[in-house]
Amino acid sequence: PSEIRKLPIGVQRWYVLETDYLSRKVNTDLIDSPEQNSQLAIYAPEAKTPFDLIGYWIPSSDLNIYKAQLPDELGRQFFRVRNGIRETLFLVHPESVDAYPKIVNGGFDTETYRALATASSRSLLVWKPGSESTPFVAKVSLYKEIGHVVRSVLATETSYGVSVTRLLHGSKSLPKNAVFMQEVLGVIPTGMNDGGMLLRPFPTEILTNERITYAPLFSLYANETAPPAGLLLEMIRESGVDPRVFLREKIIRPFIEIWRKLAVEQGISIEPHAQNVLVELKDGKLTGRFVFRDNGGYNIDENYRRQAGLYVPPHFKEFGHLPTG
């Protein structure tokens, strides 16, 4: 889309890899296919169609708000004081307006953002017109079934995602070749068990360095709409290295080392499926750095961390607990 050309080059390239190199084909004997999608086609990742995303200025006292360290620009966009009342901007997906009648019909001031679905229909690439240099990802509640699951954001997700970010911010000796897409703001209307939103700013490198972008692991081998060879095979051919050596040394070994350090040294286990794990590319080549997103997939061993003298945010269990079962 022409609008996306105003965004940082690295984000543009990431978006292409998120959508053009996306395959929803799965073994339906094992799991429900994400092609079983009840949302309107214009909001699906394959549409690549920007749409309006409306934010409502709601008194902060009417919301449960969880914050980590926000970039200054996001802080200015999502918090204000008006007529002596603190207000927070709350984003509502166009297909979910019926879930928020008190908000949508409450006469609140609004802001209009532009958005595109990424590989996940509820995780949106978002930017404010006029502030295209600082786009971000908003994980918003989508009250539509995809693969027979309603994609709303649970109240516990809004708190847990920010709690994990706080833990990462306070942690030392994290793997140097691991980049984390932090969840810095979680918001949900008071009294709702689901219907929340989470904000993920982009790491600085992808916003400021035109040579760098991120590629989700699925984009390396998906070939539904990509060139037949696939990105990974192209990389192997260009390297001139034996494919087994390339995979072992460029992807498997560095990833396993990150996983080991997080699990064994930090008490952090991750859910490393091909959507949540991305690789950093510089000039189209692997740099050895991996990018991790979706804090809801992190499992933190609090007791281990405390016994090892590692940082755990105050009240982590109460603030960030996800229900089991």
Image (cartoon, rainbow, N blue to C red):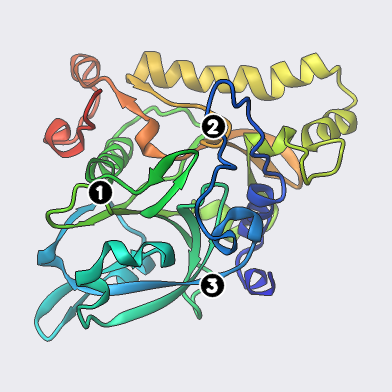
Kind of element beneath mark 3: loop
Q: Residue 307's x, y, as percent?
A: 19, 14
Relative to 137, is 22 above or below? above
Location of residue 142 by image quarter: bottom left
Q: Calculate the distance from the C-alpha at mark 1 to the C-alpha at mark 3.
A: 30 Å
What amino acid does circle 1 point to? Answer: Asp
What amino acid does circle 3 point to? Answer: Glu
| In this rendering, position of residue 259 left or right of residue 81 | right
Q: How many marks?
A: 3
Q: Residues within 10 Å of mark 2 (few under 14, many from 20)?
A: some
Location of residue 295 by image quarter: top left
Numbered badge on residue 132: 3
Residue at the spot of label 2: 177
Q: Residue 187's x, y, as percent?
A: 24, 56
Q: Calculate the distance from the C-alpha at mark 2 to the C-alpha at mark 1.
A: 34 Å
Residue 165 visible: yes
| In this rendering, position of residue 195 left or right of residue 317 | right
What amino acid does circle 2 point to? Answer: Asn
Residue at the spot of label 1: 194
Quarter of the rendering occupied by the N terminus: bottom right
Q: Residue 304's x, y, as percent?
A: 24, 15
Q: Residue 219's x, y, as percent?
A: 69, 39
Residue 75 visible: no
Mark closer to the observer (1, 3): 1
- Which numbered disc, 3 or 2, marks the residue that appears first in the sequence? 3
